[in-house]
Each structure stands twice: as structure tokens, then as C-alpha cells.
Amino acid sequence: MLLRAQDDRLRTRVLASQIGLTNHVITATALYVKVEGTVAAGSLNTTNHTFAVNYRSARSIAVDYSSAIVNGVLAEGGWVEVKLYGFDGTSFLAGKADVQASETETDN
């Protein structure tokens, strides 16, 4: 997840239990990544609680929102801000999904 966030320049928050200034090591206890974009056409599956987010014009990311708090109604083509906390090997796991007005970008 961290590599994807770095490659796509996504906002990332790391909670650390230890920071080693001498050896330049950070021990992370949690990692959160935020992605904003539109719910991809044909991707919203309300049975399996999955969808894909299209962002930064040519990027897409698969999301599993089965454990997420969803604010608003997810709809294909709708603008969504998703806070991710993990990866299950297939999809990124959402902790929260906020449906926004079309093409609205929020800060943190």
C-alpha cells in the first residue's frame, strides 16, 4: 500500500510507535492512505461491497468497503473520498468513504 501511495503521490498518514533518529528507522503501528475520485462505471458491487475509484485521470484502485463507514450513497460516476488502511491481496480496504458533490476535492 505504501508503494502505491508513493508512486501515485497519494496523501499518507503514518502512526509510529518508535522513531529511531540514529538508525533512521520508523516503526509504524498504522498506515492510512486517502484517495479521491469517481466511482468507476460498472465497478460498484453492493453485494460484495466493492468498487473502483478512478483518480488522477488515468489511475484506478480497487476498494473493498465492507468494513467502512460510508457517508452518503455510493453511485457509479459519483465523487468519493476514501480512507484506506490495508490491502487484502486483491482490493484496498476502506475504513471510511465519504460521498462528495461532483469533482469536489477536500483537504485532509
Image (cartoon, rainbow, N blue to C red):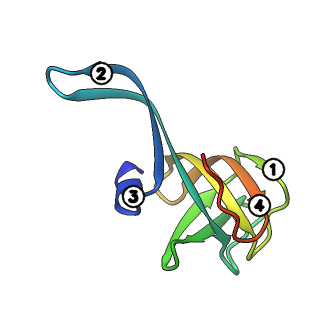
Query: Which amino acid is tagged 2?
Result: Ile
What percent of the width, then of the height, locates residue 76? 75, 75
Residue 105: numbered disc: none
Relative to 13, is 76 above or below?
Answer: below
Q: Does the residue at mark 2 contact the one at mark 1 (Cβ under 8 Å)?
A: no
Question: Would you name the residue on which mark 1 appears?
Answer: 71
In three-dimensional space, the C-alpha distance between marks 1 and 3, rounded to whole angstroms, equals 25 Å
Kind of element beneath mark 4 = strand
User: Looking at the image, is mark 4 or mark 3 nearer the viewer?
Assistant: 4
Q: Nearer the viewer, residue 17 or 91?
A: 17
Question: Would you name the residue on which mark 4 appears?
Answer: 100
Who comes first in sequence, dot 4 or dot 3?
A: 3
Kind of element beneath mark 1 = strand
Residue 4: numbered disc: 3
Image-based side of 39 in relation to 20, left or right: right
Who comes first in sequence, dot 2 or dot 3?
A: 3
In three-dimensional space, the C-alpha distance between marks 4 and 3, rounded to whole angstroms, equals 23 Å
Image-based side of 17 in relation to 48, left or right: left
Question: Would you name the residue on which mark 2 appears?
Answer: 19
Who comes first in sequence, dot 1 or dot 3?
A: 3
User: Looking at the image, is mark 4 or mark 1 nearer the viewer?
Assistant: 4
Q: Nearer the viewer, residue 25 or 45?
A: 25
In three-dimensional space, the C-alpha distance between marks 4 and 1, rounded to whole angstroms, equals 9 Å
In three-dimensional space, the C-alpha distance between marks 2 and 1, rounded to whole angstroms, equals 34 Å
Query: Which amino acid is tagged 1?
Result: Asn
Q: Does the residue at mark 2 contact the one at mark 3 (Cβ under 8 Å)?
A: no
Residue furthest left in the image:
23
Query: Which amino acid is tagged 4?
Result: Gln
Q: Residue at x 52, y 78 (%)?
A: 57
Kind of element beneath mark 3 = helix
